[in-house]
Amino acid sequence: MCGIIGIVTGHTVVTGLISSLKLLEYRGYDSAGIATMQDGQVWRERAAGKLANLEKKIKDDGVREGGIGIGHTRWATHGAPTEGNAHPHIVDNVIIVHNGIIENYAELRDELLENGANMQSETDTEVIGHLISQQLKIDKNIETAVQTAIGKLTGAFALAIMIKGEENLLIGARKGCPLVVGIGDVEGHYIGSDALALSPFSRQIIYLEEGDFVFASKEDYRIFDQAGTLVTRDINHVEVQSATMDKGNHKHYMAKEFFEQPDVVQHTLAHYLNMDDNQINIDANLDIKKFDRIIIVSCGTSYYAASVAKYWLEEATNMSVEVDVASEYRYRNPPLNAKCLFIVVSQSGETADSLAALRLAKHKGATTVAIVNVSTSTMSREADFVLPTFAGIEVCVASTKAFMCQISVLATLSIALGKAIGHINADQATTMASDLAQLPRLINDAFMVEPEIKELAHDISKVEHMLFLGRNTSFPIAMEGALKLKEITYIHAEGYAAGELKHGPIALIDEKMPLIIIAPDNEVYEKTRSNIEEIAARGGDITVLTTQKRAKEIRKLGLKAIALPDCSSFLAPFIYTVPVQLLAYHTAVHMGTDVDQPRNLAKSVTVE
Ligand code: F6R
């Protein structure tokens, strides 16, 4: 995580650094800092907490401009989120910002301390500053000194570096973490964590490769690969959709984003589904018959999207579908070969573990597909096929509309693969597709439960624990509901398969334990209904999310029920996601937590 930016134009850079940091704050908001150089002087400002604190400090202390500068927004790894640990770090002549984790930092730090280094912070970044500074004393050639020093690091990093006295030299290096170079639309050169960070200044973007170094001046730039060879990298023309840092009429980005769901689902479906004839068109040459297995790997909310798709894909294709969290998958040495269709699901397209899993699958010969929201991301560039989601920029750290778009793509993919392998026929495929076409209207209708959910949120805001239950595709939605609640309210919540409760968690049930039971009227409804009775018999505080008809029956049992629009089993995960998102949101609003930037989190998880 962490976002980095570097600018060399020879003119004033502070406004540019701050506007980029605003676009990078989704990568972490534990602290922020900038440094500039001018006339032999280095100026640095840092502040713990959000970027707004840094802006205030700069306003109070007064700006000191420079023709070159670097900036950072932090998600703490080594060392508490204090001002002292905030980047940029300055070690002698070296000014540095870093995204990533240096794995051999403890040994390097011990060595440096033994040799008399004076450490000012608890960060692994400062160690890099010391290594470069030491090397510069031995080797006066900055390019080779920096490459030698950075060559001693193991782990993942993207770095932006300035050297005191070198006011026309901006240095970047990457391994394991993304870093891009921008050629200024008007002037100068830029380096940053992503194309979005450079969008105010540059549409000509170079994606640095693993192990690359860049040495940029305002006039020119030179890139070296990890062997130290001068290389040429492609320049990509990138039109990054500018992030609308605008909440519209909403109090929070989260509300704005989940109310956009009918539109973004429509937009995403329109890319894969011809609404005139209900034919699915997946723009990827996937010869499904050559595969014997489908593997889907992802993290967090994207993992729950994958988990929903497991039910659909198995049903549609009759193939074995494995779903795993990327942080486990990548270190398991899983059997993978050319007969595997490997799908990675990611909003950001940069999540370190998911990216590593994608690379592992490619390395072992699987055909890879990335379902991603950020079209300029690393996964979009590295997968064999990309199936984009069209959620637009998601600003709120807790994912809502990206999830809906992910399951939209996975639903169309399930139909396409099922039809291609011959497990569902053309008529079934058309019926399923015409079902999907109802989604924007049904999702919109689902928001009608908001007043009831608001009332429920009032009660939930007083509890410390709660459970979400569901069967079939409602099981991943239960887990997603629990994750949303945990993330933005800090209430402990778990999602369970309803049938699994009696194997242990039922011991938790008493009148103080609220449960949300997701029970669409589908083929497993009666089974869920038995679970509802079992919990009711033990005094659990139950609210059932179900259809109008079933809600009436549930209320007759003296239990709470909230009625969602009628829909097919296929569409249920979309429709039942709405109330669990609303519940997390309104509970957080009651509690007064930071809905859009919850504590300890970051939007893009680029460290493992
Ligand atoms: C939860 C959330 C996270 C992400 C996870 C994966 O609301 O947003 O759990 O889903 O960090 O991120 P991506 O999808 O960018 O790979």
Image (spheres, rainbow, N blue to C red):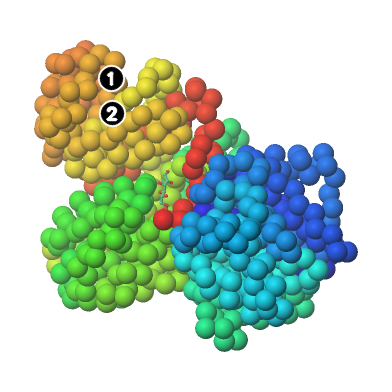
Image location (x, y in percent) of residue 446: 37, 34
Residue depicted at x 20% and y 14%: 539
Within 10 Å of disc 1 (Cα), the crowding (few <14, some 14-19, many 20+) is some
Where, by quadrant of the figure, is residue 369 drawn? bottom left
Image location (x, y in percent) of residue 471: 19, 38
Relative to the observer, which residue lies in front, 582 or 593?
Answer: 593
Q: In the rendered structure, which amino acid carries the disc numbered 2?
A: Leu
- Give the left or right position of residue 417, taking residue 49 as reference: left
Q: Are the residues at dot 2 and dot 1 in contact (C-beta closer than 8 Å)?
A: yes
Residue located beneath label 2 in the image: 467
- Give the left or right position of residue 491, taking residue 364 as reference: right
- Give the left or right position of residue 390, taking residue 11 as reference: left
Disc 1 residue: CB within 8 Å of ligand 1: no
Image location (x, y in percent) of residue 270: 41, 59
Where, by quadrant of the figure, is residue 274 drawn? bottom left
Residue depicted at x 27% and y 75%: 364
Residue 183 in view (yes/no): no
Where, by quadrant of the figure, is residue 465 drawn? top left
Residue depicted at x 39% and y 24%: 453
Residue located beneath label 1 in the image: 513
Reply above or below: 563 against 27. Answer: above
Q: In the rendered structure, which amino acid carries the disc numbered 1?
A: Met
Image location (x, y in percent) of residue 355: 39, 63
Most distant residue in the right direction = 39
